[in-house]
Amino acid sequence: MIDPACEKLADSVLVPPFPGTTAPAWFLAALERGLAGVTFFASNMAGGPESIVALTASLRSAAPDLLIATDEEGGDVTRAFYGTGSPYPGNAALGAADDASLTEDVYAAMGADLAALGINLDLAPCLDVLSAPLNPVIGTRSFGSAPSLVARHGAAAVRGLQSRGVAACAKHFPGHGATVLDSHLELAEVPGDAEEVALRDLPPFREALAAGVLTVMPGHLRVPWLTGSLPASLSPSAMELLRGELGFSGVVVTDGLEMRAVCDPYGLPGASVRALAAGCDLLCLGRDQSEDDYLAVRSAIVEAVRTGELSSARLEEAADRVASLRARLAAASAASGTKAVPEPEVGLRAARRALRLTGPRPELSDPVVVEVEPLLNIAVGQAHWGLAGWVPSGSLR
């Protein structure tokens, strides 16, 4: 027999996606039943700011305090500005400028943009320390290779976003920067023992927690000494480190559960149940999931409670944390009218600060500008923007 109360609890920890710029009827009905919210991807934002505002307003008509989450990191990883490119430089540029107050200003402006669109949970910043130069998925998403630098700028990013009433999310705990595999495609392994990880990867997360970050995202990352054969996202031991030693009491948000590191071995419903049982609170199902996928996850959670695979107390704890976050962000939104408008073009100022000139500055009468494009990855997507609008016609290679 279906337990309606348990179904409602299951809904309250899910932020599934839907395609396009209009909310489908099934999604609005789910919000009215208690669904926690939605994760936006590029297809939801393709219509531009007016379309996004109309979409978020329609969703809030069904659930005024819902969570609307997206990955807006600046630089290469952008959803709100996917068609044109982000007006804000990525973390590598901010780390190169190495001015924490500038990083805070950039993220405050980003937060103001998101808040104006109706988005209240930014799945950023990346706090991964880029110690593996050949890392295929982090790269310029990291502030740099020094733990202290990443910690300093990560905390500034958290302060900036949350000053605008948008929850920040410290990711990818305990750190994706030392890996050489892409967790979208396979289970990545974090090298090193407990002491090495503590010194290399954990300082940015400690600083983000000290800055009051509201959410943390564990990575689909195997940490042998800590998680054994499991990824951190499905590991009770990783959650004990985060909750116990580091003292985090906020919402733990999963990375996309459609990612092959967890979906291949367990399936989307199985990975969802395991993530909740391990200690995650809010489940991001990923990009290309349908109503049927959402219903399968909800049913799997209800069935796991029925069979004892997932305790009702654990599900209630997760639901309570998510409800507290929703209430906090709704209150912040109501008070947002008193906040000052951020400096316009702060992103351009930050990008210029990141430039480095080696040797004397030449007179450029007919410059050749070389644009280096990394291999396509799922986090970035297929970008349609670049330097062409900023350089003389015919100069770009």
Image: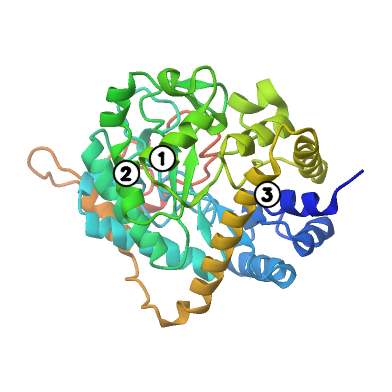
| Residue found at x 21% / y 53% | 353
Q: Secondary structure at mark 3?
A: loop
Q: Which mark is residue 244?
A: 1
Q: CA distance from mark 2 to mark 1?
A: 12 Å
Question: Which residue is outermost to the right?
Answer: 1
The crowding category of the residue bearing disc 1, from other C-alpha atoms within 10 Å (few below 14, some 14 to 19, many at least 20), is: few
Q: Is residue 362 above or below residue 228?
A: below
In the depicted view, which residue is nearer to us: 340 or 172? 172
Give the percent coordinates (x, y) of residue 161. 40, 60
Question: Which residue is outermost to the bottom?
Answer: 338
| Residue found at x 30% / y 59% | 104
Give the percent coordinates (x, y) of residue 333. 52, 73
Q: Nearer the viewer, mark 3 or mark 2?
A: 2
Q: What's the residue type where badge 1 is placed?
A: Gly
Res 19 seen here: no
Residue placed under numbered mark 2 in the picture: 206
Q: CA distance from mark 3 to mark 1?
A: 25 Å
Residue placed under numbered mark 3 in the picture: 14
